[in-house]
Image (cartoon, coloured by chain):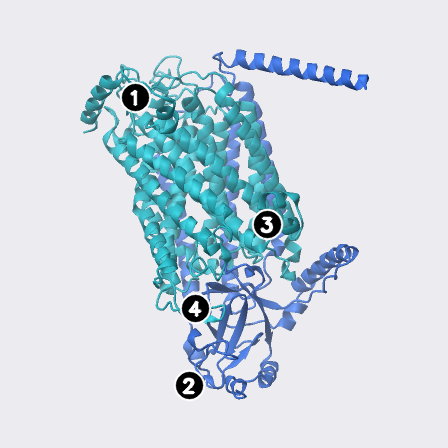
């Protein structure tokens, strides 16, 4: 099937290869080339990331020094920070939009959008995505939704402020909070467009992976990156439409007087006519996407990290099949654990038991993955490039953050840490920081493929170590203020003298946050500077096996100048030796996928 | 003035040379193909040592956090089920910290030990079914233990035992405060709905329901120690969450439906205030408040009050701009004190009577 599809594509390409003139617009703006679209996703994602992280800096400062006046607040927040003091309304808006931007715009579109687009065709041996046009639309819808989301920041009554989970009735009623007016409308419109974009992207990834694999590229010869992107796309297709449904119903409740989520409400001296709806229904719909969403964020990072660890350890990834099986297990389980966000939502306690059970099951494939990564390092010949360090950092934060999931996933323990800073610490480590590490590792590793130049490694090292120290400095102590019972989304903790002794720790956290945010400037400088002035890259700088490194450094439409290479082996033949202890290819510790089996070589039973 | 000009010219000249050399440098290097941006043996060595250094920082941070910050953990649970929660929490934390310390040590140790060197050969080690089986089955067993323990505790907590004849209290949430409605002698709450809200009847109790007559509405929550109580939660407007950190209890308050949570308070406010933990904590807090007051007084503002411990109920689900200050005082006291306090309160019927 795949071989057949490939052949026709080859011819198609031969036909148009010669008379293909590209203008600036078709090359850089409305491009249908997956490599350009990947770069567009990445840069848009990074820009959104700057906004998201800047917001976190602002509200962290408020938490450390509540009520203090800062010129920075006045500059960025304007009327929302009279005399430089942040107002409670904008605090809630900041945490809401920070969450939305980071989860959806940076870690979903910026991560999966970038690397799925870049790597799926290159690593499976395809000329481009199954539909380049759909791919282009997908990016531009993402861009449009980003613009709408950002524009909501300038709305008179403020942007959405009901938390990134936008639970109604708070998100449905402008009388309850200012941000639920125009700001919320724009949020919903933006997300609806985002979902459309995400679905188009996902369908494209799925179809491409299934149909356009080159000759010899069986599913068990795919790099783990592709497995991760493929499964991520499937989860996206299954769960994002549910969020769209929730958003549509919420729009109807807000604008057309329906009562899907609203009932028995008395606000500002009047009874609303809504009757019979239930906010718990919204929570179910939201988390039916919301939980898979965290795996949509983390699985691509896992894929990237697996690939980078193996390449830089000069070793095959340990337990390839177990890795695939655990990706599939995580994907399946991720769709039946959403209730663990709702243990104390008022749903039937028996359901809580069921969700505790399924949630703790997910620890098993996660543990397998962590152990397999560690074993991949064992007896390796580790090339500690910045990408490798970020991958090791990923394993570290994934374990640290994942372990506290055992506490939160246990309904009994969740009672007392639900919605406290313990949760914030947990999910930032396990999906926020980890996924960002995956993203950064991917950028450092595939930068030569994207831009034909290398990023500066020394700046990369500085970036990594300070980020690593800062990230743990922020989120490890945070567990403890959560265990003290400190609730999240509090504008200030001074209303409770009981929490006064936590203030120092909050300052410590903010200081680490400021340092971590500042050091990202080094990365941004390195990134943008290297695009233009970095050292020229060689074709295969990391001595990697997968197919993307068989393409020329200069990007061409269609990826390979000649025929698409056929594949004869899995992508992890690093340091493979013959029986006499010599490398399979003398003097070279890697065997690219397009190299046929050598005389006397056995295809390992992995 | 001329001196100033000369200095400026020299400075600008220096900048020009620096910029030119930089441009020259960049234009030269950017077209050169080299491997200078790929880790070499020296980098591997430096980074390997740094990863050991980082591991020391990380273990230090964990140690510091447990040593200095674990005192933030809430005091001994003030409810009967709470000690179960704490025990399970304690066991879980020990298990995850053992795993954490071992796996992180391996991770950073391997990063150091197996740092790359030219000529070294990595081991081609793709699979080992036995190993993978072991590290699948161990989490399965440990998690099975935790799941079973957790589920038994969960159903104990959530299934309210009606045989104990628990006292029924409604907690009513609105932007941004709490009210308590005691069910009175009949231990049955009168029907209520936001549509009955009118004038002094702020909780929307149905005046035609006789069960409501003896209900008592208060702004403080008093609970007799050792008496099971079941809370029925009702919201007037948006989602709230009733969080009683000291009682290890929490339940969302959902408009349009009644949620519930039951527990038995086991330590009175007085006892808690006198506990070693709380004496220390309150002392620390008051020192901090005194220090902060010095600053406030200097700015001509009112100094902070001295803090005395009281249990509190707080809102733990984002509910609007004053979400951060939606609290209610809880007082756990002896049955006699409770009865005396209750006797002073007005019933719903009497508070409605003047109209």
Instruction: Check the image and report above or below for B157 versus A332.
Output: below
- Secondary structure of the residue carrying numbered label 1: loop
What residue is pinned by disc 2? B208
Q: Mark 2 and mark 4 in contact? Answer it, CB < 8 Å.
A: no
The percent position of residue A116, horizontal first and vertical second, equals: 35, 33
The reply to whether label 3 and label 1 mark residues of one chain is yes
What residue is pinned by disc 1? A558
Disc ID at residue A79: 3
The reply to whether label 2 and label 4 mark residues of one chain is no
> Quadrant of the image for the C terminus of chain A?
top left
Marks 1 and 2, how far apart at CA: 78 Å
Tell me which numbered mark, 4 or 1, is placed earlier along the sequence. Answer: 4
Other-residue count near label 4 (Cα within 10 Å), few / some / many at <14 / 14–19 / ≥20: many
Q: Colour of chain A?
A: cyan
Note the chain letter of the blue one: B
The reply to whether label 4 and label 1 mark residues of one chain is yes
């Amino acid at each position: 099937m795949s071989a057949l599809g490939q052949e026709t594509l080859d011819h198609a390409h031969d036909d148009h290869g010669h008379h293909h003139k590209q203008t600036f617009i078709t090359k850089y703006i409305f491009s249908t080339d997956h490599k350009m679209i990947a770069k567009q996703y990445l840069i848009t994602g990074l820009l959104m990331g700057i906004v998201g992280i800047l917001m976190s800096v602002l509200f962290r400062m408020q938490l450390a020094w509540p009520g203090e006046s800062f010129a920075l607040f006045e500059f960025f927040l304007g009327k929302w920070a009279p005399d430089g003091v942040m107002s409670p309304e904008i605090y809630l808006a900041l945490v809401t939009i920070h969450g939305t931007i980071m989860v959806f715009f940076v870690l979903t579109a910026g991560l999966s959008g970038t690397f799925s687009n870049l790597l799926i065709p290159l690593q499976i041996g395809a000329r481009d995505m199954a539909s380049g046009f759909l791919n282009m639309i997908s990016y531009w819808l993402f861009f449009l939704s980003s613009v709408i989301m950002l524009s909501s920041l300038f709305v008179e009554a403020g942007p959405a402020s009901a938390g990134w989970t936008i639970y109604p009735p708070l998100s449905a009623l402008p009388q309850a909070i200012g941000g639920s007016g125009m700001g919320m409308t724009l949020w919903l419109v933006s997300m609806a467009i985002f979902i459309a974009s995400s679905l188009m992207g996902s369908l494209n990834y799925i179809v491409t992976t299934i149909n356009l694999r080159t000759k010899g590229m069986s599913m068990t010869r795919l790099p783990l990156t592709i497995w991760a992107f493929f499964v991520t796309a499937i989860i996206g297709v299954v769960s994002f439409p549910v969020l769209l449904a929730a958003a549509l119903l919420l729009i109807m409740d807000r604008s057309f007087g329906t009562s899907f989520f609203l009932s028995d409400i008395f606000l500002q001296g009047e009874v609303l006519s809504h009757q019979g709806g239930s906010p718990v229904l919204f929570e179910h719909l939201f988390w039916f996407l919301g939980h898979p969403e965290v795996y949509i964020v983390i699985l691509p990072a896992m894929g990237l990290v697996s690939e980078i660890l193996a390449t830089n350890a000069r070793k095959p990834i340990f337990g390839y099949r177990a890795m695939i099986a655990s990706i599939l297990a995580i994907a399946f389980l991720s769709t039946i654990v959403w209730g663990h966000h709702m243990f104390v939502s008022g749903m039937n306690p028996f359901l809580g038991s069921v969700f505790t059970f399924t949630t703790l099951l997910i620890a098993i494939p996660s543990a397998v993955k962590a152990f397999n990564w560690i074993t991949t390092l064992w007896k390796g010949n580790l090339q500690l490039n910045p990408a490798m360090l970020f991958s090791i950092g990923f394993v570290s934060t994934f374990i640290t953050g994942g372990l506290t999931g055992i506490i939160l996933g246990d309904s009994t323990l969740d009672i007392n840490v639900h919605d406290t800073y313990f949760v914030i610490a947990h999910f930032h480590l396990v999906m926020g920081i980890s996924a960002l590490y995956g993203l950064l590792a991917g950028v450092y590793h595939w930068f030569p493929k994207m831009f034909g130049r290398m990023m500066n490694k020394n700046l990369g090292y500085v970036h990594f170590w300070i980020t690593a120290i800062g990230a743990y400095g922020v989120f490890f102590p945070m567990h403890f203020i959560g265990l003290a019972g400190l609730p999240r989304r509090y504008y200030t903790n001074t209303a409770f003298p009981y929490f006064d002794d936590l203030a120092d720790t909050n300052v410590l956290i903010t200081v680490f946050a400021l340092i971590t945010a500042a050091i990202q400037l080094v990365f941004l400088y390195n990134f943008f500077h290297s695009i233009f002035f970095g050292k020229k890259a060689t074709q295969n700088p990391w001595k990697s096996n997968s197919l993307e490194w068989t393409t020329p450094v200069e990007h061409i439409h269609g990826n390979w100048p000649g025929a698409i290479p056929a594949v004869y082996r899995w992508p992890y033949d690093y340091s493979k030796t013959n029986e006499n202890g010599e490398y399979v290819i003398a003097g070279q510790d890697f065997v690219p996928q397009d190299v046929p089996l050598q005389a006397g070589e056995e295809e390992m039973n992995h | 003035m001329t001196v100033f000009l000369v200095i400026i010219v020299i400075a600008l000249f220096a900048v020009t040379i620096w910029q030119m050399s930089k441009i020259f440098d960049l234009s030269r290097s950017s077209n050169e193909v080299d491997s200078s941006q790929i880790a070499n043996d020296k980098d591997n060595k430096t980074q390997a040592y740094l990863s050991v250094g980082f591991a020391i920082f990380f273990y230090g941070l964990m140690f510091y956090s447990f040593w200095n910050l674990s005192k933030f953990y809430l005091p001994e649970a003030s409810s009967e089920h709470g000690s179960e929660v704490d025990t399970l929490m304690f066991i879980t934390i020990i298990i995850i910290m053992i795993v954490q310390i071992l796996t992180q040590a391996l991770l950073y140790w391997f990063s150091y030990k197996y740092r790359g060197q030219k000529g070294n050969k990595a081991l081609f080690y793709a699979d080992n079914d036995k190993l993978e089986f072991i590290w699948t089955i161990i989490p399965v067993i440990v998690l099975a233990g935790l799941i079973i323990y957790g589920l038994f505790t969960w159903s104990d907590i959530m299934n309210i035992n009606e045989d104990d004849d628990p006292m029924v209290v409604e907690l009513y949430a609105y932007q941004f405060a709490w009210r308590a409605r005691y069910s009175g002698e009949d231990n049955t709450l009168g029907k209520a709905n936001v549509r009955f809200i009118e004038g002094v009847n702020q909780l929307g109790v149905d005046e035609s329901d006789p069960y409501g007559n003896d209900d008592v509405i208060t702004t403080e929550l008093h609970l007799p120690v050792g008496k099971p109580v079941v809370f029925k939660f009702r919201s007037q407007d948006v989602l709230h969450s009733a969080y009683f950190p000291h009682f290890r209890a929490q339940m969302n308050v959902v408009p349009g439906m009644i949620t519930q949570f039951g527990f038995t308070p086991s330590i009175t406010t007085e006892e808690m205030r006198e506990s070693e933990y709380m004496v220390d904590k309150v002392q620390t807090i008051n020192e901090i408040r005194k220090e902060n007051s010095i600053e406030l007084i200097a700015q001509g503002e009112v100094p902070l009050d001295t803090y005395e411990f009281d249990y509190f109920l707080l809102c733990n689900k984002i509910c609007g701009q004053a979400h951060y200050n939606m609290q209610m005082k809880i007082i756990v006291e002896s049955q006699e004190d409770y009865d005396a306090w209750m006797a002073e309160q007005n019933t719903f019927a009497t508070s409605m009577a003047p109209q």
